[in-house]
Image: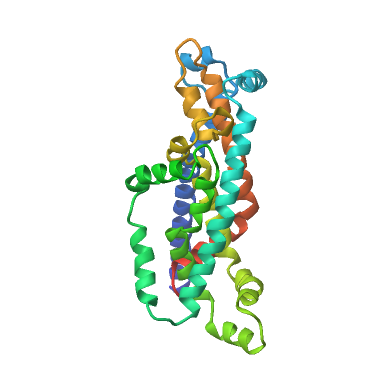
Amino acid sequence: MAKNKERSLSQHMAAKRTVRYIVLILLTVICLFPFYILIINSTRAHADINKGFSLIPGVWLVDNAKNLLKNGNLPVLRGMLNSLIVSAGTCILSTYFSALTAYAIHAYDFKGKKFAFTFILAIMMIPTQVTALGFVRFMNQLHLIDNFIPLIIPSIAAPTVFFFMKQYMESSLPLEIVEAARIDGAAEFRTFNSIIMPIMKPAIAVQAIFTFVNAWNNYFTPNLLLSKTKMKTLPILIAQLRGADFLKFDYGQVYMMIFISIVPVIIVYIALSKNIIQGIAVGAVKG
C-alpha cells in the first residue's frame, strides 16, 4: 500500500512538472516569436514583406543593410552612437546616484528622513508628459536644445531606481557592516564605494539593464530636444524612416534598422544577466 501511494505521488509530481515545462516552453515561444519574425523580415525585400507572412528567411539581409547605411537622410551609425552615449550616461548616473541616495536614507538617521523618502516616492507618480513642456522651455532658456546634457544629467534623479535600491538594502545590507567600517576609520565615500557597492552589485546590474533599455528606447524626450540630424537617436530615426512617403518607404530597411537597434540591448542583457534573478529575488522581497 505504501509503495502504491509513493508511486502515485511520484506520478502526480511528474505530471505537474511536465505541465510546468510545457507552459514555460509555450511562454518562451510566445516571447521569442516576435523577435524571430523581426529577424526573418530583415532578410526579406519590401515587395516580399508586402505579400504576407513567412517563416522562411529571405536573401536580402546584406542588401537591406547596404541600402540602410547608404541612406543619406538616416545616419544610422551616428544615431547608434548617439543612443549609446545617452543610454550609457543615463545608466551610470542613474544607478550610482540612486544607490548613493538609497544608502543615505537607509544608513543615516536625520530630521526629515521620512519626509524625504515620501517625497521621492511621490515624484514617481508624476508622468514625464506632465512636466515635458516646462522642461523643454527651461532647457531652451539654458541653450541646451540639441544637446545630450538634458537627456543624461536629469537621470541622476530616478525615483524608481532609488526605491528598488532602498528595498534591496533593507534586505541585504546590515548596518553593522557600515558601523564596522566607520570604526576602522573608513571615510563615508570610501565605505560606499569599496564596501556597499560590491554588496549592491546584483541590484545595480538589474537596474543598469532596465535603465539602459528605457533610455535606449526613449523617443518622447529626445524628440522634443533634438532637431539636428546628427544629434538624433535611433528611436527618432526609426520613426522618421517609418514616416517616409510611399515612394521612399522600404519595409526591409525598417525591419533591418529595428534589428540593428536591439543588438546593443541584447549585448548589455547578456553581460549582466547572471545577476538578474538574484537581484530581483532579493530586492523585491524584504528578508
Residue depicted at x 46% and y 54%: 20
Residue 276 x %, y %: 55, 58
Is residue 137 shown left or right of residue 148? left
Residue depicted at x 47% and y 76%: 106
Residue 38 versus residue 264: which sits nearer the camera?
A: 264
Residue 51 versus residue 250: which sits nearer the camera?
A: 250
Eyeballing the image, is 65 above or below 206?
above
Residue depicted at x 66% and y 20%: 66
Is residue 182 shown left or right of residue 143? right
Residue 150 versus residue 219: which sits nearer the camera?
A: 150
The quadrant holding residue 139 is top left
Residue 90 x %, y %: 55, 51
Is residue 147 shown left or right of residue 125? right
Which color scheme is applied? Answer: rainbow
Q: Residue 59: tell me if it is visible.
A: no
Eyeballing the image, is 94 above or below 65?
below
Residue depicted at x 33% and y 62%: 122
Quadrant of image for the N terminus: bottom left
Residue 78 x %, y %: 63, 32
Eyeballing the image, is 229 above or below 204?
above
Residue 231 x %, y %: 57, 34
Number of residue marks? 0
Q: Residue furthest top?
A: 247
Q: Residue 163: tell me if it is visible.
A: yes
